[in-house]
């Protein structure tokens, strides 16, 4: 049977322009979309037994320190608020993640919601990534203030995003943006990147 998956990522039309800007930057920047990542919104009492059970189901405790992220295998767990996390995994993992978290919660009062279709993810990396993002973000992105493993809900060029400083060396940033703002934000990044290309 033929593959009938006809999904189109929010930035499929911009892929060529993102790749061209990456090439033109001479290694200063890398801009790309990471489409279809699994994203599960998790809300629960951080002091309750469901929090510990959710951490065990994910392979790492939920981050309790504001504006931090935890990596475990191919998952990232982002702190979004005192009782809210975003679990990000590989494409297609949302059903498994949702089932694992619901099973771990048992009878506890929790909210587990698949929000994978709500956002797409832009990868911004390279030696000038922080400089590029600083053009449109009010956060202090200095690594001493916003270190690898940091995450925050913020505005980038007036678009609401979740910004994640990746922990892997030279991995740069994930910019999780609502699908309806993805084209606008990609255009803004490409325009702001012109001084580096």
Image (spheres, helix red, strand yellow):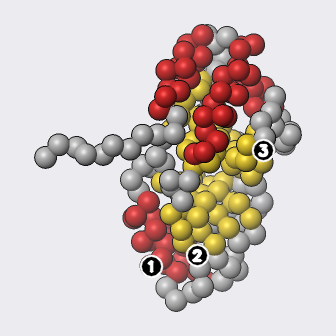
Element under label 1? helix
Q: Earlier in the sequence, mark 2 or mark 3?
A: 2
Query: How many numbered dots are placed on residues in this image?
Result: 3
Residue 140 location (% of width, % of height):
86, 39
Q: Is residue 41 left or right of residue 1?
A: right
Q: Earlier in the sequence, mark 1 or mark 2?
A: 1
Element under label 3? strand
Query: Which labelled disc corresponds to residue 47?
Result: none
**Residue at 50% of width from left, 63% of height from top?**
114
**Disc 1 and disc 2: Cα gap in Å?**
12 Å
**Residue 98 in the image: above or below residue 134:** below
Residue holding disc 1 = 103
Foreground pick, 133 / 13:
13
Question: CB of mark 1 within 8 Å of CB of mark 2?
Answer: no
Residue holding disc 2 = 111
Residue 72 visible at all: no
**Residue at 65% of width from left, 27% of height from top?**
187
Label 2 neighbour load within 10 Å: few <14, some 14-19, many 20+: some
Residue 105 visible at all: yes
Residue holding disc 3 = 155
Residue 150 location (% of width, % of height):
72, 48
């Amino acid at each position: 049977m033929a593959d009938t998956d006809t999904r189109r990522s929010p930035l499929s039309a911009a892929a060529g322009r993102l790749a061209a800007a990456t090439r033109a930057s001479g290694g200063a920047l890398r801009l790309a979309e990471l489409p279809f990542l699994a994203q599960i919104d998790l809300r629960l009492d951080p002091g309750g037994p469901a929090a510990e059970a959710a951490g065990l189901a994910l392979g790492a405790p939920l981050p309790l320190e504001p504006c931090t992220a935890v990596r475990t295998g191919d998952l990232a767990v982002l702190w979004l608020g005192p009782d809210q996390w975003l679990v990000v995994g590989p494409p297609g993992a949302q059903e498994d993640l949702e089932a694992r978290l619901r099973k771990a919660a048992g009878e506890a009062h929790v909210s587990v919601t698949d929000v994978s279709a709500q956002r797409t993810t832009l990868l911004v990396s390279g030696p000038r990534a922080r400089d590029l993002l600083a053009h449109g973000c009010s956060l202090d992105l200095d690594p001493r203030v916003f270190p690898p493993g940091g995450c925050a809900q913020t505005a980038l060029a007036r678009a609401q995003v979740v910004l994640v400083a990746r922990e892997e060396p030279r991995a740069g940033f994930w910019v999780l943006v609502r699908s309806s703002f993805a084209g606008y934000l990609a255009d803004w990044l490409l325009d702001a990147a012109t001084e580096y290309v």
